Image (cartoon, rainbow, N blue to C red):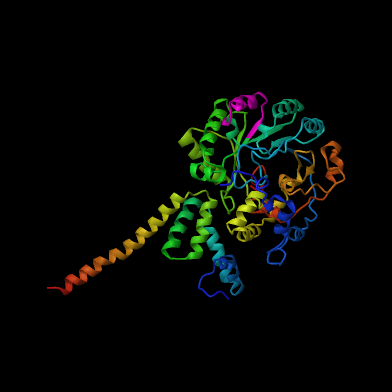
Amino acid sequence: MATKSLKARHNRLAENNTQLDILNGGVFADGELPYFKDKIENIGKFPLRPKKLEILQINVGYMCNQVCAHCHVDAGPDRKEIMTRETMRQCLEVIKNTGAHTLDLTGGAPEMNPDFRWFVEEAAQAGIEDFIIRSNLTIIRANKKYYDLPEFFKKHNVHVISSMPHYTRGKTDKQRGNGVFDKSITALQDLNAVGYGMPDSSLRLDLVYNPSGAYLPGNQTAMERDFKKALIEDFDIRFHNLFAITNLPIARFLDYLIASENYEDYMYALVEAYNPAAVENLMCTNTISVGWDGWLYDCDFNQMLDLKVASKVKHIKDYNEDVLNDRNIVVSQHCYGCTAGAGSSCQGSVTE
Amino acid sequence: MANNYYDAADLRKFGKITEWSEELGEKFFDYYGKVFEEGALSAREKSLIALAVSHVVKCPYCIDAYTKDGLEKGITKEEMMEAVHAGAAIESGATLVHGVQMMNKYNKLSM
């Protein structure tokens, strides 16, 4: 398993254009598979247009204590891109004035941003209905300075969404690195201990499952049932919901697909599983994604491919919801990942 | 044309069998789809049965399909291998149980 990001390894896939060339070439360029744009044009959905903004997703940096094999952010300890306090202030202005009901902080490991706690304290005052922090769990046990994170999360009543690839050690460690499973289990127990994830608790703890390889996620409800049974029986761990997320062919997952000679089969699987019913609720239609440097994107995946919003407003400092809502959403072949099967978003399936 | 009997890429074309017999093909896929829905048995359990049977009927397409299906359903490799052993045990048992016929015949023909 690689211990550095694609960027640090000077891998050609660290270049966005190389990724886009691969995604638009091969089976798509020779017409074997249809372009995503054509698929949604067939159901009268192209150009894809935004609905009312509901979720503001902010990526506060690509630094992470893990180097997961599937990471579409290409995050890792060697990534130095970190949101500054100045950009955070610009975000706070927007958070206070937006009609969005959900604020979603992500990374990397968002907790590694030196201004993370300041930002959370400020943002928690803004009266947002659902304040999400996406935690990789192991950060809670990575260093003493993070041990109090469960209490900190509780104090600000944030909704914790945590990555948990599988309820078995082998699968989790293979995707995320040796020792990740044990640390994740301890972190979940720490979160449970302060009240997160309990059946009647308002302290929401949800898990994110994504496949450990070149296949699509199964039925979200069935996966949640299996996770709950295993985690309660083996570790006495409780959580609320499981979100099943499809891996998109971007960055390190794309690198894995190509290196393991699974790329073409995976794209076939995504196209074959295309579900027109999922188009209506694609996350890009109700979300704005803010990059660590303040640039705006239709989703986190477009952010990683540097596909900025097709709008006059492109940066958080110029934010204007009305202008932004009058845009066409930028799509490419990776978007098949969000329309496969029951559909996929940062909140899991979109059709069930 | 590939110079071998099995081509993994042919699995993607399975759905095309309806092109030469639409009615029967569609009836088959309707039935097939229904069989693997959640029922008295979970879809997970049915996937493991299908994986075991795939080995017994020695269908490489089915083995690929149900290994992938098992991964999608979160089934572990240990569970998959146990299912294969269950199929193999029945298959070898089915061979061995005919040994009783052999013994019967042997005894009948022998003084």
A156 in the magenta segment = yes
Count of marks overlaid on the render: 0
**Residue A330 visible in the displayed image:** yes
Q: Position of residue A165 (x, y in %)?
A: 56, 43
Q: Position of residue A62 (x, y in %)?
A: 69, 39
- Per the rendered image, the range of residues in magenta is A141-160
Asked if A273 appears above or below B5 in the picture, the reply is above
Residue displayed at 66% across by 57% down: A274
**Residue A341 visible in the displayed image:** no
Q: Position of residue B94 (x, y in %)?
A: 33, 63
Asked if A226 appears above or below B82 in the picture, the reply is above
Asked if A167 appears above or below A39 in the picture, the reply is above
Residue displayed at 46% across by 36% down: A234
B18 in the magenta segment = no
> Along the horizontal axis of the image, is A117 left or right of B46?
right
> Along the horizontal axis of the image, is A291 left or right of A345?
right
Residue displayed at 55% across by 32% down: A188
